[in-house]
Image (tube, rainbow, N blue to C red):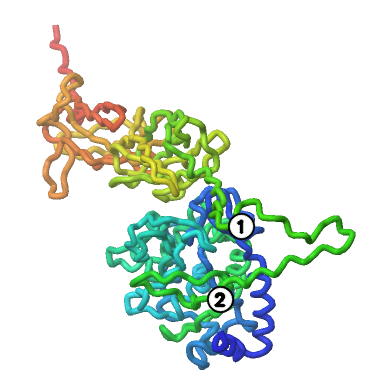
Amino acid sequence: MAAQFGRRLRKGAATTAVAAVAVAALSASQAPGVNDHGRQTAADATPSPEASASDGSATGNSPYYTDLPPLKSPSPSPSTGPGPGGTGATEAGIPATVLDAYKKAETALREAKPGCNLPWQLLAAIGRVESGQARGGRVDADGTTIKKILGPQLDGNGFALIKDTDDGAYDGNSSYDQAVGPMQFIPSTWAWAGRDGNGDGKKDPNNIYDAALAAGHYLCRNNWDLSQQGDLDRAILSYNNSREYLNLVMRWLEFYRKGTHEVPDGAGTLPDNRSDDGASPTPTIPGATAPAGSTPKPGPKPEKPATPQKPGGGGTTTPKPPTTPPGTPSTPPATTPTPTDTVDHLEDAGTAKLTAMAGDAFSKRISTRAETEAGKAVAKVRVRFTIVGDTDTTFTGGESVATVATNSSGVAVAPALKAGEKTGAVTVRATVVGRTVPGLDYKATVTERAADTLVRTGDAALTCAPGGEFANQVEVKATYNGAVADGVAATATLITSADDATANDKGPYFKDADGKTVRTLSGLKTDAKGLLKLPKLYADDTTGTFLLRITTAGGATLTVELAVAAAATSSPSASASPSA
């Protein structure tokens, strides 16, 4: 403790004074209270409805670093300064690989979710608060941390209670979950939020590129626009559901927005203060590396003896005799079950048939009810909806997982589904977060894009001389229920007759890329406006009236007449009548 105090003292009187006051305020407000899901959160934290409907937080509300930004804004250009552990330029800088990961994640999200407006400085702020920028940039050339960064085990002992969800695959702990990596994801969140940010085919929470991209997608879910303060607050609270956490991240975000600079990997400073300072010592997990700043803290101080009441206060200081005989074991206090503990199964809550055309939103939504063994509805339970299998169908917003809290009727309604381009069956699985009960599968069907009406966009006659080229190309417009039918598959065939849809062997024809005669075109698609313009048509030496039939998925059909006729010739003058 003396060494740690000495290290902090060397920061300088002015910085220490400011930090001490701020950290004291933050620590004082971190008195834990337990919400109805067993998660511990700051006593005055006020989660938004959106945050409450999520899994609680990306980090499981694990401890975080409470160090405040330096008083001076970072310089936008590199400068010299002390190395790790000191103050100066490195305190404000961001390690090069870590900074690169944040900026690459911003670029990826700008393309994937442009409406989110994710700034890389937000990732930097969260990365600073969660892990001190990957422990000062201690990462290898691929961006993977040299040693694992693990939060304390979430065993309910001063922290949230989250039992193991990954069999120790990420955190090395098969009893309880721990936050993992530079962005401190808990395994159950990483299971659906993880991303491959460096293109190596793996989703590794210990890799800063993977973790930064995952954090970006996590913050951009629910159609949040981070340029709006309300959505920004909701996104940050969903990462760690504490008002103090929100305020601290916002301080770092504004700090980095004023400019920053690179420092070499491994040369960043390590934070000193954590939100769990003064909590019980962090348990040691065999084979795991404790997080930076997790030096065991002294246990709680002994309780002070009760102060006798003042005379006339209406009380007494006379001790009461024990109510149980000496040596009788005390009965542990009863634990009140959370709503999640009472869930026995999930039931469908009247979900209608789920069908949508490729590219369209499903008009119906999935509804699931959480029930006790006796069939009683359970409110305030988090239900996770996961789209499984090989499909590009997503929830609105582009995510494949959504978590929603049940309402007073025990019902959780999933976000609307958006059909992708892959047709066929889609499975959506509903499970209870924090409770092992059988999941409930819902089947949805994605059908191919279709049209029910085809019309020509022009009315000019389609004529041609034998051996010539038609002057006008055929263009049609497809609609479905009166709306533009874009991306609809179509086929054009020069048919034998109105009653015989086989391809004709004479008359008008198309040409393929090699100039060969083709009388059937498949693989055609309408454009974004529902239009389809066919290639040029040619005629052989056969004259007559011919038929072009265009069909689309969904059954729309249009038959167009084509005329091939020789040019009209003038008739010879009539001979003079013979004279009588």
Give the residue furthest to the top: 580
Label of residue 298 in the image: 2
Q: Quadrant of residue 4?
A: bottom right
Work out whether residue 264 or residue 117 is closer to the camera in this orientation and state it. 264
Q: Quadrant of residue 299?
A: bottom right
Q: Position of residue 204 (x, y in %)?
A: 34, 65
210 horizontally vs 17: left or right: left
Say which quadrant the N terminus sits in. bottom right
Disc 1 versus disc 2: distance between alpha carbons?
21 Å
> Residue at the spot x=57%, y=73% of the render?
277
Q: Vertically, is 51 above or below 157?
A: above
At numbered mark 2, what does the secondary structure look like: helix, strand or loop?
A: loop
Q: Nearer the viewer, mark 1 or mark 2?
A: 2
Work out whether residue 391 or residue 474 is closer to the camera in this orientation and state it. 391
Q: Which residue is mark 1?
A: 33
> Residue at the spot x=52%, y=92% of the render?
81
Q: Position of residue 145 (x, y in %)?
A: 37, 75
Q: Position of residue 55 (x, y in %)?
A: 48, 52
Q: Vertically, is 26 above or below 526?
A: below
Q: Position of residue 309 (x, y in %)?
A: 82, 63
Q: Amino acid at mark 1?
A: Gly
